[in-house]
Image (cartoon, rainbow, N blue to C red):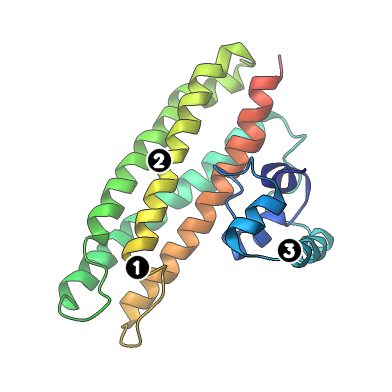
Amino acid sequence: MTSLAELARVQPGATLVFLRHRLDFCCGGKRSLADACRIAGLDPAAILEELDREARRGGPVAGWTDQPLAALADHIEARYHTALRRDLPPLIEAARKVERVHADKPGVPAGLADVLDEFFAEMEQHMRKEEMILFPMLRRGARGEGVYMPVRMMESEHDTHREHLAKIRALTADLQLPPHACATWTALYHGLEHVEAELMQHIHLENNILFSRATREG
């Protein structure tokens, strides 16, 4: 059966559907749609209908399956690396403010700022490895066995990113705002939801398109 990763790779808009229903198409993308829906308690037929609707609209990662790998690496750096460096530091500060100001209120995400700080440091190190080692190799035309080890390292680190996303979800009650949440608290959770969605797209482009092609070609 077709895997989530394959659907995300070939069908425009599939990633939007998977994000909407919290179906992991990047690190957990080897599961079939049927298996993933069974685990999540979803109706596969309903998901297929949504996939068909999104396919007619196009999607955010469409068109990259046959573009030069150097161009895809450039796109990942310009779109996703830049955005993460821009968006995550203000969210860390917002988390510290929420924890400090609302320390005595129910539902406060105690410890969230430290987790985000650790996450950002981990992401920064990961992105620098890509920018300074792997992506330059791909731009020089390295393929197949020549990039196998750095690719596997990056994929392993992606699994750690997923663990951090799970921690963030756990600390924030699945990003559900309590009734007494202030504007900063609200902006924090909305921002984290956006960062999570962007990171899922980012990892999908790397794991299922860039890295997959780089290790197959050459």
Which comes before the other along the chain, label 2 or label 1? 2
Find disc 2 in the rendering and name its residue.
160
Q: Is residue 29 left or right of residue 121?
A: right
Q: In the drawing, what numbered circle is on residue 172? A: 1
- One can see residue 131 in this view: no
Cα separation between marks 3 and 1: 27 Å
Judged from the image, the secondary structure of the residue bearing numbered disc 3 is helix
Quarter of the image with the N terminus is: top right
Task: Inspect the image, locate mark 2, and give the three-letter code of the amino acid beneath it.
Answer: Thr
Q: Position of residue 46 (x, y in %)?
A: 76, 67
The residue sitting at 59% across, 60% down in the picture is 40
The residue sitting at 42% across, 63% down in the picture is 192
- Between 163 and 198, the one lying in front of the other is 163
- Between 97 and 3, the one lying in front of the other is 3
Q: Position of residue 177 (x, y in %)?
A: 38, 78
Find disc 3 in the rendering and name its residue.
47
Which comes before the other along the chain, label 3 or label 1? 3
Task: Inspect the image, locate mark 3, and give the three-letter code of the amino acid beneath it.
Answer: Ile
Q: Is residue 101 above or below residue 48?
A: below
Q: Position of residue 190 (x, y in %)?
A: 44, 70
Quarter of the image with the C terminus is: top right
Q: Quadrant of residue 167?
A: bottom left
Question: Crowding near pointer 1: few (<14 within 10 Å), some, many (20+)?
Answer: some
Judged from the image, the secondary structure of the residue bearing numbered disc 1 is loop
Q: Is residue 156 above or below residue 160?
A: above
Q: Is residue 35 above or below residue 184?
A: above
